[in-house]
Image: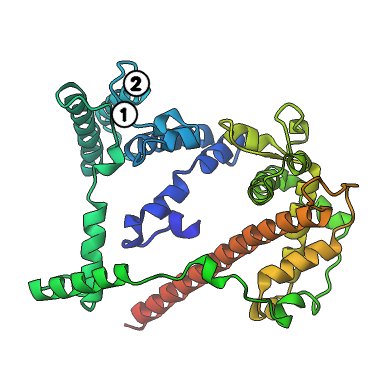
Amino acid sequence: MSKALNPSSFERQDVKLVLQVFNPHVAEALAARKGHTDFQHATATAEFIKIILRWWSIVNVKTPSKGFHHRNVYEEPMSNHTDDPKASFLSAFITWLDVWEFYRHDTGVLTQETLSALRLSAQSLLALVKYCVSELHFKYILLGKVQTDPLESRFGQYRQMAGGQYHISVRQLCETEGRIRLQNALPRMSNDDLRGIEETDSVRDAGTSFSVHVSDADLDELRAQMPVIGYVGGYCAHAAMKVLKCESCQRQLVVTGNTAETGEDTHSLIAQLDRGGLKFPSALVIAVVMYTEVVVRKLMTESTSTQFLHGPNQKNVVRQLTLDSLPRLEDIDTCENGHTYELLITLVANCAANIMLNTLCKQRNNLLRIEKDQKAKNRKARIFLGK
């Protein structure tokens, strides 16, 4: 996240970093902190992020069924309906930009170039939709296709395969195009090619060299993070259900929205972000996620972090230690499809370990980046003072 908040001049062109800031989770987190004194403008910032997010949802539709799968009306294609909310939003978006420009603020504003580009793109897209619907009789328009990303990506491949040159010759273009087509014709390795590979002893004995004890005090330290843990647990339950495809096991992994423990704040974040498709995890799933978080924290202590990070199969280590430290939480019998209690918690722990380790990698990479930037600043300062 630090890279998204403090990007370099080159990284400012990375859309993925922009979407880490303009993110529905960021908006909901700011809205939840609106009563705190250290977040004075949290509500206004959250509203601004939601406006940009809604605009991005409308202009980034590339498939007709995106809005259906995401349960978001603003991610549906632009249609010929007169009461289309997406067209109404784009019109209101243009008015909002005009009013913003009219106030002529000195700070906290878009540059004139950015504001003009946003206004022009919104006006052009509305005119394009009107023409395609009225003149060409299109049923819908995919605004995400109105872009040059595929062309830029192709020419990026040309430049990279020509030695990183920005200006390439016609001969280099033809040669690289031939190599790209040859690569597309060659067979690629799939997951099916990896089936049948047996685990080595190092994988099976991944967690034997570590000893982790999870106490009640360790779990109590996570109480302030329960909304986030509940959200992670919902995804873990969803991942396990995709594998099991069993209604009996589903009742053990998730609870309905009516019986969700929103009073304990565990499902509050899910309730804020839910559009009808998110899962509310059961107490069993929440416990597995909490134990996984504690295990990762204890492995990253000074005494074990070096051995853990330099060893193989970190995910298997975390999963095995979580299963070993987790007590028998519920008396769950084997279902009619043969799914055992051990299988349920193994699937949840496997997904939770993936998420925790992914977060850990991002945090450590951010720290390394900050340290590298600080060293560069110190080096420049020494050079400047030396002169």
**Label located before the other in sequence (2 or 1):** 1
Q: CA separation, marks 2 and 1?
A: 7 Å
Front residue of 227 and 319: 319
Q: Position of residue 314 (x, y in %)?
A: 67, 72
Q: Residue furthest top?
A: 82
What type is the residue that disc 2 sits on?
A: Asp
Give the crowd class for mark 1: few <14, some 14-19, many >=20 residues within 10 Å.
many
SS for tag 2?
loop
Above/below status of 304 relative to 8: below
What type is the residue that disc 1 sits on?
A: Met
Identify the residue under disc 1: 78
Front residue of 64 and 163: 64
The answer to whether the residue labelled 2 contacts the one labelled 1, judged by CB atoms less than 8 Å apart, is yes
Q: Quadrant of residue 384?
A: bottom left
Residue located at (53% from left, 66% from top) = 191
Give the crowd class for mark 2: few <14, some 14-19, many >=20 residues within 10 Å.
some
On residue 84, the disc is 2
Q: Position of residue 152 (x, y in %)?
A: 23, 58
Front residue of 220 and 307: 307
Q: Position of residue 223 (x, y in %)?
A: 77, 46
Q: Is residue 143 left or right of residue 286?
A: left
Quadrant of the frame with the C terminus: bottom left
Above/below status of 293 relative to 107: below
Q: Is residue 328 left or right of residue 199?
A: right
SS for tag 1?
strand
Colour scheme: rainbow
Above/below status of 115 relative to 377: above
